[in-house]
Amino acid sequence: MLADLNEENLAKALPEVTLAGAPAVWGSVCNVALEAQVEATVGGTLERFGRLDVIVNNAGRMQFKSIETLTGEDWLGILTVDLLGAFYFIKQAFLHMKPGGTVVNVASIHAIETEPLVAPSAAVKAAVLSLTRSSALEGKPKGLRINAVLPGAIDTPMLWNNPNVKSGVEKIDREDVGQPEDAAATIAYLASDDAAFVQGAEVRVDGGRLNRL
């Protein structure tokens, strides 16, 4: 099942998933910042499929403002999507998943190293890693696995529309830019039985970009 805030994007994605081989697909328009909508999305999933095996928390926002111009509303706009959205789905996983279920949180390398003008996004992504660790500890006795992926520069509109990239504040070597499939493959691994002994992990998918001094 797919959940998206944008109904038009959701409508475009559903047939793509079907063409990729999914035997059944359902989409839910969902604002992850609202717990009631997350509950409705999970309830609809259980109603249609009878089970909940994997959750991928991939919703995220970025905002480019200097610290002195940020407001509390700016912070809450990112926190409610990136952190609370993940929490709401993890809560539903704990309530409804059977042993063997798994959650993959998509964080960012900004949780480890960052750049100017993105303080809320970097701080909240670091909090997602902390939530991953806490959830892994509490999920283990339930037979649930919770891990995180930290994508680096990925070839998406969000990367190339980044004002820091456009202005040259953030230098990006084309060799350090990965494809969405690179992140997706790592998520698929963590969600699979091949990662049965991987718990509370933080897996960087950045092509080694952070290895250089």
Image (spheres, rainbow, N blue to C red):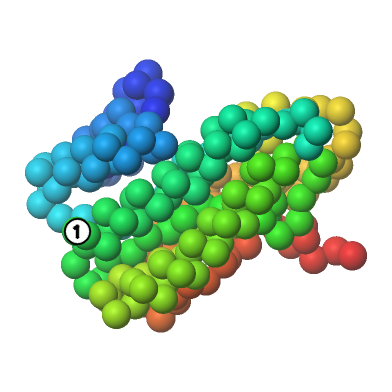
Residue with the most extreme front position: 72
Marker count (numbered): 1
Q: How crowded is mark 1: few (under 14 residues within 10 Å), some or many (20 or more)?
A: some
Could you tell me which quadrant the N terminus lies in? top left
In the picture, measured across the screen, residue 195 lies left or right of residue 41, that is right
- Where is residue 196 shown, x and y percent of the image? 36, 77
Picture residue at 33% right of the left edge, 64% below the top? 102
Residue located 37% across and 18% down the image = 8
Question: Which residue position holds label 1?
Answer: 96
Three-letter residue code for mark 1 = His
The image shows residue 211 at horizontal and vertical percentages of 80, 66
Residue at screen point 54% across, 33% down: 77
Q: What element carries label 1?
A: helix
In-front residue for pair 97/194: 97
- From the viewer's perspective, tell me whether residue 89 is left or right of residue 167: left
Residue 2 location, quadrant:
top left
Quadrant location of the C terminus in the rendered image: bottom right
Question: In this orientation, does residue 160 appear?
Answer: no
- Percent position (x, y) of residue 151? 61, 52
Which residue shows up at 72% across the image and 43% down it?
Answer: 119
